[in-house]
Amino acid sequence: MQCIHRIGAYAIQKEIEGNPQMLLTNTKGGFFYWQEDRASRYHGFFVRENGVMLKTIAGLKLGVRLSAKRVTNRFSSFEIERQGGVRELFFLDQDSNSLVWQANEAITLSVLLDGKEIFDNSEMGRFYEVTAEEGCVVVEFVKREDGTLGRRFFLAIAGIGGSRAKKEWVEERYAWDQERNDPPFERYVFHAADLQGKKFVFSVAQEKDAAIAAAKRVYDNAGKIKKSLDAEAEWFAHKHGQSISDEEIRMAYLAAKYSLHHMEVKDEWKNSEGLYAGIPWFAQFWLRDFAISSSQLAPNVARAIYARYLDHWVVNGTLDGRDAPGVLRHYADTEGLFFRCAAHLTQTGVLQGEELRKTKELLVSFLHTALPARMHDGLVVNGPKETWMDTEYRGSDRAGARIEIQALTLAMFRFAGQLTGDTAYFLKEAELLRAVRAAFWDGNILADGAGDATQRPNIFLAYCFYPDLLLKHEWEKAFTYALDALWLPWGGIASIPKTHPFFCGVDRGCDDPNRSYHHGDAWFFINNYAALSLFRVNVEKFKPFIDALLAASTHDILWEGIFGHHAEVSSADRYTPRGCLAQSWSAASYCDAIDQVLQSKNIG
């Protein structure tokens, strides 16, 4: 199959094998995740209503089997060209939860529905009612369990042509979910109707009248909406693509940056509400993912989302998130990443005035009150599963003093000194620096934890967070040792040494499905920051590693997973992008690396 990426004046194409996946998003937090032969319950049209992610459409299936021969990613839309000359176009309206489907000739389209909250896999109590109202096919979905009314939404379908209600249950099997060892692997979905026509709009809302009104508006204005989306994409390409000469890297860079920017969710007043960590199953707002990605967001967007976290801390007295109602989850890097983001916004002149004053007060308060309680023997310690490596396998949970947490704390002391002018913070920084070097650095190896010399890729994060931890020649030694332990021949860095007894080389492929996650899998955001770190320390010595790391990321963005998006992880044993296939910090870190590495003209 031929795959084409096209945006503005730029285009690139390649013959690929497999079953391509595509993704569209809207500013309301909804997304349409497409694959020709759906292999996951996460494929379909999802909408965000009142902070809850709902699945609505499971799939739109042509009434006749026509193999796809060409897929074109236009960033704000995508096209499928099939045997026999049939062409399909998909795009989302940005102001409503509306999906537009168009074809170049009238054809039968089967509408398959799967109403549910995104993680609700129960199959009982699902009710659909299909009617015709105001020129639209209208479907009401209700979830009832134990006689209690649960989730409810309306789907209105606008279009000129015929329709025939089917009202049949159809079993779907999910091969990708089974490969990932992520049950259930099959599910019944509702075949609501067959449509006959060239253009249909599918609009979802909590109220029937709103769904019908949105479907009619978008249908009548589909041409204008598409033209506006194309103009925005062309402007984006012109703004961000001109400085890169290599056509593959330029297209991957544009795709990654576009992917990241369209992870932003806006509220009903068009204000930035948050940044998704990833799609499909990380469509949530997590501070860590935002903070790491913030340098690649538009400054006004980064400031607006930061301000929401700032206000949350001021009001609630904590940044700890909730895993469940009433249950707080603490992470050891939360405050450090928050203030790292603040430092960047301050240095670029974005954070000023009252927001900067509040930031300074919170930083001073944290360093004087909360931080001392986390110190032990002069180092910052954390509990089990409190770092970004938040899984556990046979007691391997990274409890204790960890290298990237020390680096973030050192950066906080420096930022406090810069904000306040108080030299006492610089003295605290120097004191902690001595303690960290004594506990973690032996002259050749930079340990992942105090008393734990196991090599992990967190030393690359430590470098990015606080490069003054070691001298440049010391970093060179540390990176050389780490690469010897962690390097993967396809161009990645494992999350634990290949010789470690807990190492698992296949994503979700060992005794515990989560074992590989932080005991083998290569994380693309780590790979990208490793490339950046190696470049800054010794570009000539580490050039083969840098090239291989960036080549693997570039290939993933363009030709693997979801086309035009950057995946979360790959298996260690073999280059197989897996996990959440559109991950914000993967995209942001790739752009960070390209900004410095390629544009220096030393690489590429």
Image: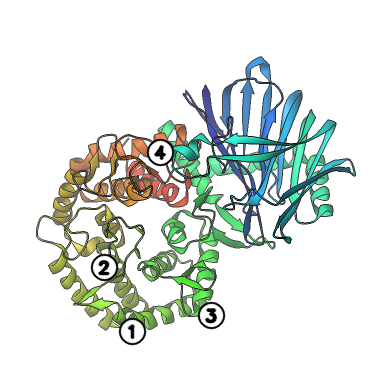
**Quick one: SS at disc 3?**
helix
Q: Is residue 37 left or right of residue 154?
A: left
N-terminal label among 3 and 1: 3
**Quick one: SS at disc 4?**
strand
Measured as percent of width and height from the top left, residue 453 is found at: 16, 58
| Of 519 and 271, the residue lying toward us | 519
What whole-number distance in Å separates the C-alpha atoms at marks 3 and 1?
19 Å
User: From what the image shows, is residue 15 above or below residue 499?
Assistant: above
Q: Are marks 3 and 1 in contact (CB under 8 Å)?
A: no
Q: Which mark is residue 97?
A: none
The residue sitting at the left extreme is 443
**Quick one: SS at disc 1?**
helix
User: From what the image shows, is residue 305 above or below residue 47?
Assistant: below
N-terminal label among 2 and 4: 2
What whole-number distance in Å separates the C-alpha atoms at marks 2 and 4?
31 Å
- Which residue is tagged 4? 577
What whole-number distance in Å separates the C-alpha atoms at marks 4 and 1?
43 Å
**Quick one: SS at disc 2?**
helix
N-terminal label among 3 and 2: 3
Nearer the observer: mark 4 or 3; the answer is 4
Task: Give me the residue at 42% from left, 65% from top.
Answer: 341
- Which residue is tagged 1? 368
Q: Are marks 2 and 4 in contact (CB under 8 Å)?
A: no
What whole-number distance in Å separates the C-alpha atoms at marks 2 and 1?
16 Å
- Which residue is tagged 2? 406
- Which residue is tagged 3? 315
Q: Are marks 2 and 1 in contact (CB under 8 Å)?
A: no
